[in-house]
């Protein structure tokens, strides 16, 4: 049997990692400015993370959600304090798509409505409702095209108000910094206006913090730069540093109904041990603050250098887009194969940087030098 071919793969087999560096099977070292697609939050193979995962696996890896799991309760309390949402409740699942799927479902249960507003160039996942809310017709199968979702321009409050005033929208779902969409950022005026309109029309505001959240922007959540409190917040990627896990933070306006939401693997013992270890390291090493400081340093350095072929540098914290005057493919490949540096991409011409939150200024300088060699 062979693997089903879904991704174009770089011919590199990564077998080892430490901090912001990884090694292939030939022993070649790479600087990781991609973090496994924003998943590695505290760095590869952090010793505390390895220790806590090993301890838990030696005790119990899994039992079902039909019994008390005190690790889930600990995680809910710790996460509430870390992000400032102690009055919200937490539902744990396995992937970002699942978190968004359940958020949209919960919004529809709460309002009794079926229509959703989403941003142009949005990406929210590949499951049924999540992929319909994703603005990419290439990955929306006919069975998922049910007409639930209207896509609207970024930061165009007038267009969103026009749709919301129709009174049939159950939810607005937004990424405060769009990842796949090219590191495009919501303005405070737009999101604050959207919050007001959602309140006026009885619509649920969902902030998808799967990529831009969990400290990546230099605050725990990206929407906290913009001065709003969403009704539902979805998290994944960095929550467990590579172990499959996600969550839905639910405001007090929602009432739990037994059987309405459920999961087999979500919030299992090993996943919770991973997530608790991540919070330990984030707090001990002040990684949210580090993301803010090193991210601002890297963005400013890239702007000041005015590198050839770079038309814009934008982002917040350690979620950075470098817009090029040409397709990103050649630059990204040369960074990988000549300078041994992993980067991401979005759109057709944006290099996307999503490094572990422990990136140092020295490593940022190292990346800039490697990029400079390629572009010059």
Image: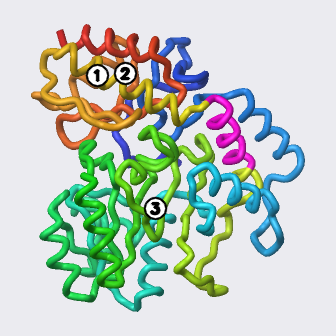
The residue labelled by disc 3 is 97
Q: Quadrant of residue 352?
A: top left
Q: Determine whether 251 is above or below 352 in the image.
A: below
Q: Is residue 282 magenta?
A: yes
Residue 352 visible: yes
The residue labelled by disc 2 is 297
> What residue is rendered at 28% in x and 54% in y?
188
Tell me the tag on residue 149.
Answer: none
> What residue is rendered at 59% in x and 42% in y?
242
Question: In the rendered view, does 124 fall on the left or right side of 47?
Answer: left
Q: Are marks 1 and 3 in contact (CB under 8 Å)?
A: no
Could you say where residue 26 lies in the image, as x and y percent from the top left?
A: 53, 13
Q: Earlier in the sequence, mark 2 or mark 3?
A: 3
Could you tell me what secondary structure mostly forms the magenta stretch?
A: helix
Could you say where residue 345 lies in the image, as x and y percent from the top left?
A: 29, 36
Q: Is residue 278 magenta?
A: yes
Q: How many marks?
A: 3
> What residue is rendered at 32% in x and 34% in y?
320
In the image, the segment drawn in magenta is 273-285
Q: Are marks 2 and 1 in contact (CB under 8 Å)?
A: yes
**Furthest residue toward right:** 59
What is the CA distance from the residue labelled 1 to the residue labelled 3?
Answer: 33 Å
Q: Look at the numbered disc 2 and give the secondary structure of its residue.
A: helix
Nearer the observer: mark 2 or 3; the answer is 2
Q: Quadrant of residue 191?
A: bottom left
What is the CA distance from the residue labelled 2 to the residue labelled 3?
Answer: 32 Å
Tell me the tag on residue 300.
Answer: 1
Could you say where residue 250 lies in the image, as x and y percent from the top left?
A: 54, 70
Q: Earlier in the sequence, mark 1 or mark 3?
A: 3
Could you say where residue 63 lies in the image, as x and y percent from the top left?
A: 80, 63
Mark 3 residue crowding within 10 angstroms, few (<14) / some (14–19) / many (20+): many
Mark 1 residue crowding within 10 angstroms, few (<14) / some (14–19) / many (20+): few
């Amino acid at each position: 049997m062979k693997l089903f071919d879904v991704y174009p793969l770089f011919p590199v087999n990564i077998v080892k990692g430490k901090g912001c560096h990884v090694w292939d099977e030939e022993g070649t070292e790479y600087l990781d400015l991609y973090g496994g697609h924003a998943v590695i939050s505290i760095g590869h193979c952090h010793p505390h993370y390895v220790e806590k995962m090993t301890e838990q696996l030696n005790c119990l890896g899994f039992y079902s959600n039909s019994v008390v799991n005190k690790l889930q309760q600990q995680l809910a309390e710790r996460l509430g304090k870390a992000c400032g949402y102690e009055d919200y409740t937490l539902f744990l699942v396995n992937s970002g798509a699942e978190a968004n799927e359940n958020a949209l479902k919960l919004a529809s249960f709460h309002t009794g409505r079926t229509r959703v507003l989403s941003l142009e160039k949005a990406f929210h996942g590949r499951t049924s409702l999540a992929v319909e809310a994703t603005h990419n017709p290439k990955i929306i199968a006919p069975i998922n095209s049910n007409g639930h979702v209207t896509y609207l321009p970024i930061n165009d409050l007038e267009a969103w108000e026009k749709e919301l005033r129709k009174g049939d929208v159950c939810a607005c779902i937004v990424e405060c910094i769009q990842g796949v969409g090219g590191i495009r950022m919501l303005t405070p005026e737009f999101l604050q206006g959207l919050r007001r309109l959602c309140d006026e029309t009885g619509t649920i505001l969902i902030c998808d913090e799967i990529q831009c959240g969990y400290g990546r922007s230099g605050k725990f959540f990206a929407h906290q730069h913009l001065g709003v409190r969403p009704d539902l917040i979805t998290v994944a990627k960095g929550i467990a540093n590579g172990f499959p896990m996600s969550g839905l933070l639910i405001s007090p306006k929602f009432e739990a109904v037994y059987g309405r939401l459920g999961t087999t693997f979500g919030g299992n013992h090993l996943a919770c041990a991973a997530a608790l270890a991540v919070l330990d390291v984030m707090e001990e090493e002040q990684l949210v603050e580090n993301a803010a400081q090193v991210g601002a340093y890297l963005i400013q350095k890239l702007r000041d250098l005015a590198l050839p072929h770079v038309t814009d540098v934008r982002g917040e914290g350690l979620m950075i887009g470098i817009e090029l005057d040409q397709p990103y493919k050649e630059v990204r490949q040369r960074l990988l194969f000549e300078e041994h540096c992993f980067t991401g991409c979005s759109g057709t011409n944006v290099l996307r940087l999503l490094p572990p939150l422990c990136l140092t200024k020295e490593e940022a300088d190292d990346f800039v030098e490697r990029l400079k060699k390629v572009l010059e």
